């Protein structure tokens, strides 16, 4: 009797193991569930660590709708006492295309709002439920809603900065690309909701920019294969049309907005950030970067910029603000010419040489006295 029970138990266990193996091989969903759990824990830890850095006097408005979908909402942050429109940073959170949400960056948004900006944290749909380019379309839609209703949200529609971290940096860079390049907009079949010269700059932190550059055989191979399978909707994702369109680096043009790009030296995505920065510098786009020597110890991980208890995270924040201080407001025209859109492009030879050596370009810290005066309790 006991022997029969043990045999039945062993048989059931084997069947369950086979089912589990098949589930992981036939669908990305089981792996995505694990990834979401890990990312959720990371977001909670990051938010808890940032709490002590949040200034007082930040107004928060949550779950404002920009579309009809359940994920088409955003959170808004700005300093108390704000009466006039402010330069606005629209931030797209990360999560490997399959995880994360805007709550995981809430405290960082408040910190930036304390520096005088209106902050918008955009939510979007995740894979596998939503495949490429749905999140790109949603972020683009959000931008259109925000500029049409700018007066309701303390937003200056002529001073929009698009930002993102990790997968959010990919979404942000794709929206920047379709906003400034009609050929890409046509290829991806998304009509831009901003005029090119409304988009003053992009901030791209710890981002992914070229799926063809990923190493599926390395330590992160399982993760990368899972998220690309989920996001492109097919296990043979390399053969999908979207795989080529996902590459930002191969498609950027001289019209791409001024950009701040940074990754940690321990981030497996850092080579993609460096490659994008080199490409933009070669085109003559106004860019600034923060990269670190490859032998720096301790190595800076993916999303290092959110750790403000570390000097590198503080440097990333200060350098981001300094970069934004170099971006002038441009006059909006109904049909801007490429030369007008990129009227603030700098020369690129010096920048290209610096990027090849991966040495950080140091710039002074930036504050705006009129913004600080309006920040209550900050």
Image: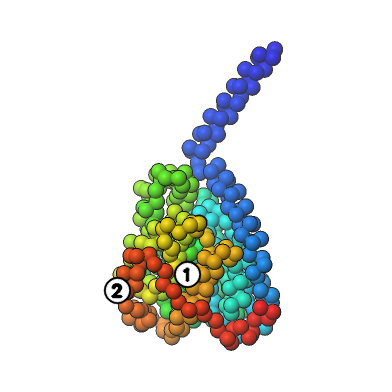
Relative height, residue 11 to residue 153 (above, below): above
Color encoding of the figure = rainbow
At 45% from the left and 65% from the top, the residue drawn is 262
Relative height, residue 130 to residue 109 (above, below): above
Q: Secondary structure at mark 2?
A: helix
- Along the horizontal axis of the image, is 59 left or right of 206? right
Measure how far apart labels 1 and 2 are at the Cα level.
22 Å
Image x and y of residue 332, in percent: 44, 83
Relative height, residue 289 to residue 266 (above, below): below
Q: Dot 2 corresponds to which residue?
A: 349
Q: Specify the label residue 203 is tagged with.
A: 1
Do the residues under discs 1 and 2 have CB atoms within 8 angstroms? no
Q: Nearer the viewer, residue 260 or 16?
A: 260
At 66% from the left and 65% from the top, the residue drawn is 51
- Along the horizontal axis of the image, is 274 left or right of 75? left
At 41% from the left and 74% from the top, the residue drawn is 258
Query: Can you see residue 63?
Result: no
Image x and y of residue 221, in percent: 44, 45
- Along the horizontal axis of the image, is 8 left or right of 233? right
Query: Can you see residue 215?
Result: yes
Image x and y of residue 241, in percent: 36, 53
The number of numbered badges drawn on the structure is 2
Image x and y of residue 324, in percent: 48, 77
At 54% from the left and 76% from the top, the residue drawn is 88
- Along the horizontal axis of the image, is 17 left or right of 268? right
Q: Specify the label residue 357 is tagged with.
A: none
Relative height, residue 56 to residue 368 (above, below): above
Q: Residues within 10 Å of mark 1 (few under 14, many from 20)?
A: many
Where, quadrant-wise, is the N terminus in this rendering?
top right
Q: Residues within 10 Å of mark 2 (few under 14, many from 20)?
A: few
Q: Secondary structure at mark 1?
A: strand
């Amino acid at each position: 009797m006991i022997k029969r029970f043990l045999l039945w138990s062993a048989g059931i266990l084997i069947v369950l193991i086979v089912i589990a193996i098949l589930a992981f091989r036939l669908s990305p969903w089981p792996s995505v569930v694990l990834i979401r759990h890990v990312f959720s824990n990371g977001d909670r830890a990051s938010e808890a660590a940032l709490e002590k850095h949040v200034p007082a006097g930040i107004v928060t408005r949550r779950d404002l709708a920009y579309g009809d979908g359940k994920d088409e909402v955003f959170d808004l942050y700005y300093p108390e006492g704000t009466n006039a429109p402010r330069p606005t940073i629209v931030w797209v959170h990360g999560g490997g295309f399959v995880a994360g949400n805007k709550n995981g960056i809430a405290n960082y948004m408040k910190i930036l709002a304390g520096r005088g900006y209106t902050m918008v944290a955009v939510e979007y749909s995740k894979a596998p439920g939503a495949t490429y380019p749905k999140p790109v379309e949603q972020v683009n839609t959000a931008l259109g809603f925000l500029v049409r209703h700018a007066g309701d949200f303390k937003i200056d529609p002529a001073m929009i900065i698009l930002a993102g971290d990790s997968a959010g940096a990919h979404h942000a860079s794709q929206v920047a690309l379709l906003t400034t390049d009609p050929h890409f907009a046509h290829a991806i079949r998304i009509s831009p909701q901003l005029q090119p010269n409304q988009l003053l700059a992009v901030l791209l932190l710890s981002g992914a920019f070229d799926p063809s550059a990923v190493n599926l055989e390395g330590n992160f191979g399982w993760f990368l294969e899972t998220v690309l399978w989920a996001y492109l909707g097919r296990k043979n994702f390399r053969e999908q049309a979207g795989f080529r369109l996902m590459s930002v680096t191969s498609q950027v043009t001289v019209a791409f907005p001024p950009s701040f790009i940074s990754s940690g030296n321990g981030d497996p995505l850092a080579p993609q950030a460096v490659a994008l920065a080199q490409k933009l510098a070669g085109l003559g786009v106004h860019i600034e970067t923060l990269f670190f020597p490859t032998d720096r110890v301790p190595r800076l991980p993916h999303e290092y910029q959110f750790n403000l208890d570390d000097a590198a995270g503080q440097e990333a924040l200060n350098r981001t603000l300094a970069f934004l201080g170099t971006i002038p407001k441009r006059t909006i025209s109904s049909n801007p010419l490429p030369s007008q859109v990129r009227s603030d492009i700098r020369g690129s030879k010096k920048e290209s040489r610096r990027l090849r050596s991966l040495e950080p370009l140091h710039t002074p810290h930036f504050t705006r006295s009129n913004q600080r005066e309006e920040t209550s309790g900050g």
